[in-house]
């Protein structure tokens, strides 16, 4: 699966990238809002976009709008910090980062 990962937290982004690549996925990890918006509008194909809670909610909403417009088939998974948080963005699926890598990989299988 080709994945676009958006987070302003470099450490989390690198950790997710390593986990996802070890599971056989191709990951484009972006750690800036401006680059995230460019990727969301690019002609590159993504099967899935991961948006981290460390990406500001307003920027996440804008990235999602751009993804839906330019990549309507791309599924969007939003990663909240803790289970039970109510995110301010609309995604196809949600997963709690605090649930760990196994939870993230399970959600990817479901999508």
Image (cartoon, rainbow, N blue to C red):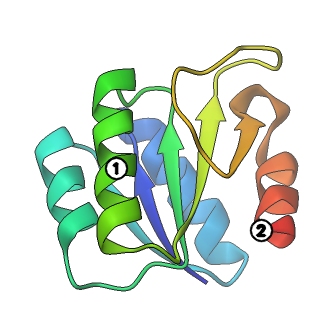
Q: CA distance from mark 1 to mark 2?
A: 19 Å
SS for dot 2: loop
Please report contact status of discs 1 and 2: CB closer than 8 Å, yes or no: no
Residue displayed at 69% across by 16% down: 86
Quarter placement of the C terminus: bottom right
Residue displayed at 28% across by 40% down: 62
Disc 2 crowd, CA 10 A, few/some/many (<14, 14-19, 20+): few
User: In front here: 37 or 97?
Assistant: 37
Numbered disc in front, either 1 or 2: 1
Q: Is residue 24 above or below residue 97?
A: below
Q: x, y (%) of residue 102?
A: 87, 52
Per the image, the residue denoted by label 1 is 65
Q: Is residue 18 above or below residue 74?
A: above
Per the image, the residue denoted by label 2 is 111
Residue displayed at 20% across by 67% down: 41
Q: Is residue 106 above or below residue 100?
A: below
Q: Earlier in the sequence, mark 1 or mark 2?
A: 1
Q: x, y (%) of residue 14?
A: 45, 52
Disc 1 crowd, CA 10 A, few/some/many (<14, 14-19, 20+): some
Residue displayed at 24% across by 52% down: 36
| In this picture, residue 12 sits left or right of residue 56 | right
Q: Is residue 49 above or below residue 28?
A: above
| In this picture, residue 93 sits left or right of residue 84 | left
User: In front here: 75 or 10?
Assistant: 75
| In this picture, residue 94 sits left or right of residue 78 | right
């Amino acid at each position: 699966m080709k994945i676009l990962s958006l987070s302003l937290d470099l450490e989390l982004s690198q950790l997710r990238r390593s986990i996802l690549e070890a599971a056989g996925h191709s990951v484009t990890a972006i750690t800036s809002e401006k680059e995230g918006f460019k990727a969301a509008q690019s002609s590159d194909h993504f099967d899935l976009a991961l948006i981290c809670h460390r990406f500001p909610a307003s920027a996440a909403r804008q990235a999602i709008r751009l993804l839906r417009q330019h990549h309507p088939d791309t599924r969007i998974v939003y990663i909240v910090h803790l289970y039970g948080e109510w995110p301010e963005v609309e995604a196809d699926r949600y997963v709690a980062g605090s649930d760990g890598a196994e939870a993230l990989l399970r959600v990817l299988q479901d999508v």
